[in-house]
Image (cartoon, rainbow, N blue to C red):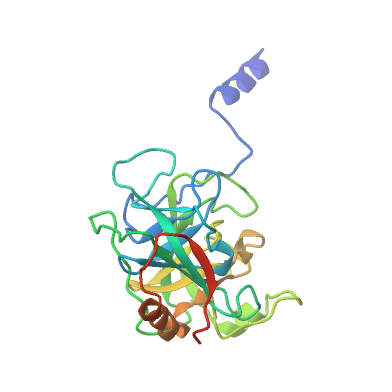
């Protein structure tokens, strides 16, 4: 009887085989974070001015996608959101290659800056090995554990030197100067299962997630597009593609 009561008590406490995921951000502490997926998929971008956001190539949205700004919990209406259609997508060329993973997304109308919606500054320098940075996105922070996107998650991670990162690459993956890696080699706080999770160091946008290696093996760094290498390209795209239409288009930039 005592054993039966013990099992009943464990059942009532909601014991689960899933690990607890408690890396929720302070609500609205990342006002530049943009959701490009919604409640069923997880994909992020970073707002860099009232018209533009950046994301990774594999997260570049198709037509009819809505960019959601001012979000924290994707499952509820918090009254802080701005839902704006995507008007134009410009992928870095060559995209979806071993060399580049970056896309810029123009909104159909400018974002209205508020306490909950603000841009993040582009990098004025490149991140340094050992530097402590913040990663934010929607999705699980537990390796090999999936969950539907809900509340925004935040991790604090160190920048990893290039050679340490290269040593973890599988044979089919090539290193690019457009990559930067982060993660705890001791196997903790190294996974955020959100395509294009946003990397910020010292208040500057430094990366968008490229490969989530830390979500398959906690001892492997995760890979981000090294945005300090693309500052000129980003600024040229913003100067060249002026807001002229609200019809969504996906383009390959010929600007290098």
Q: Residue 92 placed where, x, y %?
A: 53, 77
The answer to whether residue 157 is above or below residue 234 is above
Residue 155 visible to the viewer = no
Number of marks drawn: 0
- Point out the residue furthest to the right here: 171
Could you say where residue 143 lies in the image, as x and y percent from the top left?
61, 55
Q: Is residue 94 visible?
A: yes
Q: Residue furthest top?
A: 1
Residue located 60% across and 63% down the image: 214
Q: Nearer the viewer, residue 205 or 191?
A: 205
Which residue is located at x 31 percent, y 68 percent?
Answer: 49
Q: Position of residue 73 (x, y in %)?
A: 40, 44
| Relative to 14, 173 lies left or right | right
Quadrant (top left/top right/bottom left/bottom right) for the N terminus: top right
Front residue (pair 206, 35): 35
Q: Residue at x 29, y 46 (%)?
A: 80
Closer to us: 26 or 254: 254
144 left or right, relative to 120? right
Up/down of 8 relative to 100, above or below: above
Relative to residue 146, is residue 196 drawn left or right?
left
Q: Find residue 186 and report its horizontal and vertical position in percent.
A: 58, 67
Residue 200's image quarter? Answer: bottom left
């Amino acid at each position: 009887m005592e054993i039966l009561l013990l099992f009943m008590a464990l059942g009532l406490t909601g014991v689960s085989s899933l690990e607890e995921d408690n890396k929720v951000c302070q609500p609205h502490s990342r006002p530049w974070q943009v959701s490009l997926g919604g409640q069923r998929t997880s994909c992020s971008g970073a707002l860099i001015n009232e018209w533009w956001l950046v994301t990774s190539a594999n997260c570049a949205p198709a037509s009819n996608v809505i960019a959601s700004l001012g979000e924290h919990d994707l499952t509820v209406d918090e009254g802080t959101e701005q839902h704006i259609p995507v008007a134009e997508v410009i992928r870095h060329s060559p995209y979806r290659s071993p060399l580049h993973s970056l896309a810029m997304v123009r909104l159909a109308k400018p974002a209205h800056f508020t306490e909950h919606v603000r841009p993040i500054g582009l990098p004025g320098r490149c991140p340094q090995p050992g530097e402590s940075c913040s990663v934010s996105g929607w999705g699980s922070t537990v390796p090999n554990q999936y969950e539907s996107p809900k509340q925004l998650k935040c991790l604090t991670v160190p920048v990893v030197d290039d050679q340490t990162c290269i040593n973890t690459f599988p044979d089919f993956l090539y290193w690019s100067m457009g990559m930067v890696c982060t993660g705890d080699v001791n196997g903790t706080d190294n996974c955020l299962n959100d395509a294009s999770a946003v990397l910020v160091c010292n208040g500057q946008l430094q990366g968008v997630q490229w490969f989530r290696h830390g979500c398959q093996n906690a001892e492997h760094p995760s890979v981000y597009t090294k945005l300090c290498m693309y500052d000129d390209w980003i600024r040229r795209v913003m100067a060249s593609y002026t807001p002229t239409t609200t019809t969504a288009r996906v383009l390959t930039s010929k600007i290098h």
